[in-house]
Image (tube, helix red, strand yellow):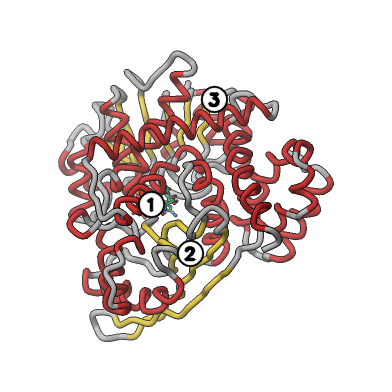
Amino acid sequence: MALTEGLESIFQDVIKRNPGEAEFHQAVREVLESLGPVLVKYPEFAESKIIERICEPERQTIFRVPWQDDRGEVQINRGFRVQFNSALGPYKGGLRFHPSVYLGIIKFLGFEQIFKNSLTGLPIGGAKGGSDFDPKGKSDNEIMRFCQSFMTELWRIIGEHTDVPAGDIGVGGREIGYMFGQYKRLTNKFEAGVLTGKGLVYGGSQVRTEATGYGCVYFVEEMMKAHKNGLKGKKIIVSGSGNVAIYTHEKATELGGKVIAMSDSNGVIIDEKGINLDTIKTLKEVERRRIKDYCEYHKGAKFVANGNIWDLQCDVAFPSATQNELTGKDAKKLIKGGCIAVGEGANMPSTPEAVHTFIEAGTLYGPGKAANAGGVATSGLEMQQNAARDAWSFEATDTRLHSIMKNVYQICSEAAEEFGAPGNMVVGANIAGFIKVARAMTAHGIV
Ligand code: NDP
Ligand code: 2IT
């Protein structure tokens, strides 16, 4: 999609100032494509260069993470924290440990996080961090030493009122525990609200583990409900088999859907009877094994090595693995096969061509920054509980999550309608997320 002249020049400037960061450019462009009508309605945002300022992170930190592997050999990784925007609250966003991590990935994630966090209605700014560390095949002790070394740098720039990291790819409850332990030791403070996604016994929140997947399903249910439809009886595919994918499966199944395929970076499993989630949880959450091992336990299931999950036919798709995992060609195949709804559990899993294809076809399409906002929203609820030294029940927390996701859907729908793109959740999410941040930045002056 073409940009207006003013927005195109902002975009060219972003490319020039951030060379070689393709994912960041992609995320910025997608937001800018929605903002034309906003600048017509609110010319003051253009005058005070809100968009140019939003595209420039407030602060970026890159640091060395040395650690010793089990053989005593010294390893060196690179750590990142991009504190993108604090107009609405302390910086907030996950940490990703994956060998593909570099500044461009952290910046795309941090940029999207600003608008996602705004949509939750909670007082949280946007940030992201992580490392090019590869947790695969590492022993528990190696993971602990890495997390301790990572936190030995990170602790200086975070804090419950400053910046509150959480998990993302490769960072779950185990890693958060090791990082919390090291932060506590370095600061001599039990500052529960400095990290979210903590274990339940030391300040974690009920439902945080489930939140991104559950929230994504709640969002898709809202989109379908508006079209007098629902997940009941639907054939579903969920890519990935990590935290988001597992709890997407759990909630979608509870609502009457049948998940017939999941994946990891080595391939796809297909079980037409419905993928057995207990087996996936054991393989992935406990034993940290590969998804192909599923077939050892379920003889009717099939494993396709290096397969493309989007070759399969389904009614509803939940891309829940990683960025750009679903191409324009994949989107066309899905639509041809009868797919009517897509909920992005992952961040930016669809390429720009795929997004365009879904929107053109009228597919009910929930973009990541809206559909997967339940994770960070529940992190926000964890911060509330920590601040009050309280712990809510599972039911009370899930009820809050559900109503937040309904509200995210509502405000995206209203913004899409108001700005001339009814039903377009990309436009709705970008505009609704942006306006709140822009108003706060305007109130704060030129900072
Ligand atoms: P996990 O590490 O728990 O799981 C990631 C899953 O995606 C694994 O199955 C992994 O397979 C697969 N995957 C990751 N990278 C690649 C790749 N480059 N190619 C193919 N497969 C890949 O992460 P999460 O479930 O937490 O995160 C999944 C997505 O959801 C990410 O995009 C993340 O940013 C997003 N997200 C996460 C939230 C959270 O609360 N955790 C909140 C909102 C969004 P393998 O094990 O083989 O690498
Ligand atoms: O992408 C995301 O929203 C997350 N990884 C969760 C961030 C958080 O702070 O809970």
Q: CA distance from mark 3 to mark 2?
A: 31 Å
Say which residue appears at 74% left-offset and 64% top-offset.
Answer: 16
Q: Amino acid at mark 2?
A: Val
Query: Which residue of the protein is positioned furthest toward the left in this rendering?
Result: 297
Mark 3: secondary structure: loop
* Mark 3 to mark 1 CA distance (whole Å): 27 Å
230 vs 3: above or below: above
Could you tell me which residue is drawn at 35 percent across and 54 percent down?
Answer: 383
Q: Does the closest atom of ligand 1 sit within 8 Å of the Cβ of label 1? A: yes
The location of residue 233, given as percent across then percent down, is 32, 18
Q: Quadrant of residue 163?
A: bottom left
Give the position of the N terminus as an image quadrant.
top right
Circle on res. 265? 1
The residue furthest right is 5
| Residue at which label 3 appears | 363
- Front of the two marks 3 and 1: 3
Q: Nearer the viewer, mark 2 or mark 1?
A: 2
Q: Residue at x 29, y 43 (%)?
A: 210
Q: Secondary structure at mark 1?
A: loop
| Residue 347 drawn at (x, y percent) | 49, 47
Res 339 seen here? no
Would you say residue 147 is visible in this rendering?
Answer: yes
For the residues bearing labels 2 and 1, Cβ distance under 8 angstroms: no
Residue 164, image quadrant: bottom left
Image quarter of residue 312: top left
Identity, as a three-letter code, of the amino acid under mark 1: Ser
In front: 370, or 277?
370
Residue 433, how many percent across, how many down? 58, 42
Residue 327 or 222: which is nearer the viewer?
Answer: 222
Q: Which residue is mark 2?
A: 101
Q: Nearer the viewer, residue 328 or 414?
A: 414
Determine whether the residue tagged by mark 2 lies in a helix, strand or loop.
loop
